[in-house]
Image (cartoon, rainbow, N blue to C red):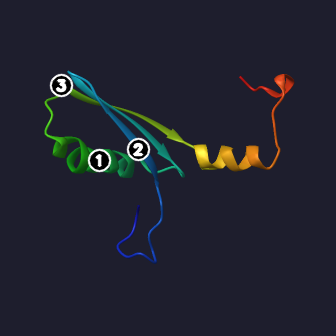
Amino acid sequence: MQGNNLQSNNRLGTVDIHFTNTAVHGTLILERELEESDLTKLIEQIDEDLVLSADMPRDDFLVSVYVGKDVGFYSDEYFAEENSDGIELDGDDDLI
């Protein structure tokens, strides 16, 4: 989030962090582009606030950064409601 109070907070994106024995891997998905200096500050803040606070030894913090948009949030509950409405995918509708 960016901003100091609840009314002016703007979501920047999301981060997923995965710890291994030697490194920490992060995937940062931004909802808008940031200047390089702002991006590096954000990564440093994530490192200080989240990664280092986990108190796990690491050799490196590797971050992949993407810019995209949020298209929805899906859960088992969502799919249960869809199925109860009688919506079904047949074999021809599979996307994968």
Q: Which quadrant would the C terminus be assigned to in this image?
A: top right
Q: Residue at x 44, y 69 (%)?
A: 9
Check disc 2 and report its element: helix, strand or loop.
strand
* Mark 2 in CB contact with mark 1 (< 8 angstroms): yes
Identify the residue at image location x=26%, y=24%: 20
Residue 22: x %, y % from top left: 20, 21
Residue 35 marker: none
Extreme residue toward the front, this view? 84
Mark 3 and mark 1 lie on one chain; the one further toward the N terminus is: 1
In front here: 3 or 53?
Answer: 53
**Residue name at image x 41 percent, y 44 percent:** 15
Residue holding disc 3: 59
* Distance from the alpha carbon under mark 2 to that under mark 3: 20 Å
Q: Residues within 10 Å of mark 1 (few under 14, many from 20)?
A: some
Contact (Cβ within 8 Å) of mark 3 with mark 1: no
Vertical placement of residue 35 versus 95, above or below: below
For disc 1, the marked residue is 46
- What residue appears at the point 80 percent right and 50 percent down from the top-left corner? 85
Query: Can you see residue 17?
Result: yes
Report the side of 54 relative to 5 (left or right): left
Q: Secondary structure at mark 3?
A: loop
Q: CA distance from mark 3 to mark 1?
A: 16 Å
Q: x, y (%) of residue 80?
A: 67, 45
Quadrant for the N terminus, please.
Answer: bottom left
What amino acid type is highlighted by mark number 1? Ile
- Circle 2 residue: 15
Answer left or right for 6 relative to 18: right
User: What is the CA distance from the residue labelled 2 to the residue labelled 1?
Assistant: 9 Å
Question: Which amino acid type is marked by label 3?
Answer: Asp
